[in-house]
Image (tube, grey):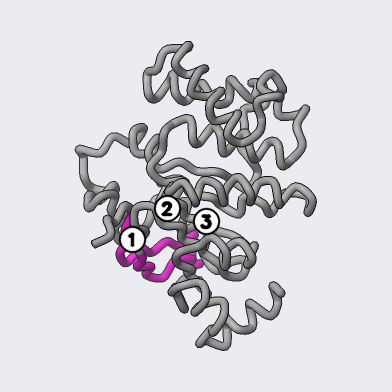
Amino acid sequence: MAEQVIRVEGLKKSFGDHQVLRGIDFAANKGEVVCIIGSSGSGKSTLLRCINLLETPDEGKILYHGRDILTDERISMPQYHAKVGMVFQQFNLFGNMTALENCMTGQMKVLRRSRAQSMENAMKYLRKVGMEAYVGAKPRQLSGGQKQRVAIARALSMDPEVILFDEPTSALDPEMVGEVLSVMQNLAQEGLTMLVVTHEMGFARAVADHVVFMDQGVIAEEGAPDDVLGAPRHERLRSFLRSML
């Protein structure tokens, strides 16, 4: 039986009077790519931010290997954030640091690695995403696609078990999208567990093991890509797919 890494049960989140998540239940197994799709405002990004504890849920459980990260005091939050990394829509790189330093600082501060060890690991992942020629560049000297590849290398440098991708290509020029999706596809083929909020339906169809369609704060439909994207049951999903294609 597949090993569940992340499981969400009954997750609810409101901002003021606006209920964004209305009771979410889903799981991601080890080595799985789960693509979360849906229109703007459906709760996709809030779900990822709750899993990463950038937002605190109002109700429900977030289980990491069966332990509720909201209540289990044995879970160290810095260690959890190292194991469950996040790549943001707007890159969130440190503007005053080079690409290499961006990939080293978390390792030294959170994982307590030596500078030499952190540098070696950072270089490994910058090479992996094709950014070894830009290790001395600051974010302002990089294109959007290059910044996002550095952000992915930074997440990988922490040796995570899961990476959450929050619309990683939506801030990119169209010609940059392919280079980032290619890096993500390679990571998927290597067996990294990934939760990806995306509008890239081609990527979801080609790479996802499981697709989740969110609508108005609930999961309206989920399943294998061929079922969800190829033979949608709900009119809301059919309408969403028509608008995307």
Marks 3 and 1, how far apart in space? 15 Å
Nearer the camera: disc 3 or disc 1: 3
Provide residue 152's location: percent of width, then percent of height. Answer: 57, 39
Along the line of sight, the residue nearer the viewer: 212 or 227: 227
**Image quadrant in which the C terminus is located:** bottom right
| Classed neighbour count for the residue bearing mark 3: other residues with Cα under 10 Å, few (<14), some (14–19), many (≥20) | many
Please state if 74 lies on the left or on the right of 105 as rendered: left
Label 1 to label 2: alpha-carbon separation: 10 Å
- Which numbered disc covers residue 99? none
Label of residue 8 in the image: 1
Which mark sits nearer the N-terminus, 3 or 1? 1
What residue did someone put label 2 on? 50
In this picture, is 194 found above or below 60? above
Label 2 residue SS: helix
Q: Is residue 18 magenta?
A: yes
Quadrant of the frame with the N terminus = bottom left
Image location of residue 109, percent across then percent down: 43, 20
Q: Amino acid at mark 2?
A: Cys
Q: CA distance from mark 3 to mark 2?
A: 14 Å
Eye-nearest disc, 3 or 2? 3
The reply to whether the magenta stretch includes residue 24 is yes
The residue identified by callout 3 is 196
Name the element at disc 3.
Answer: strand
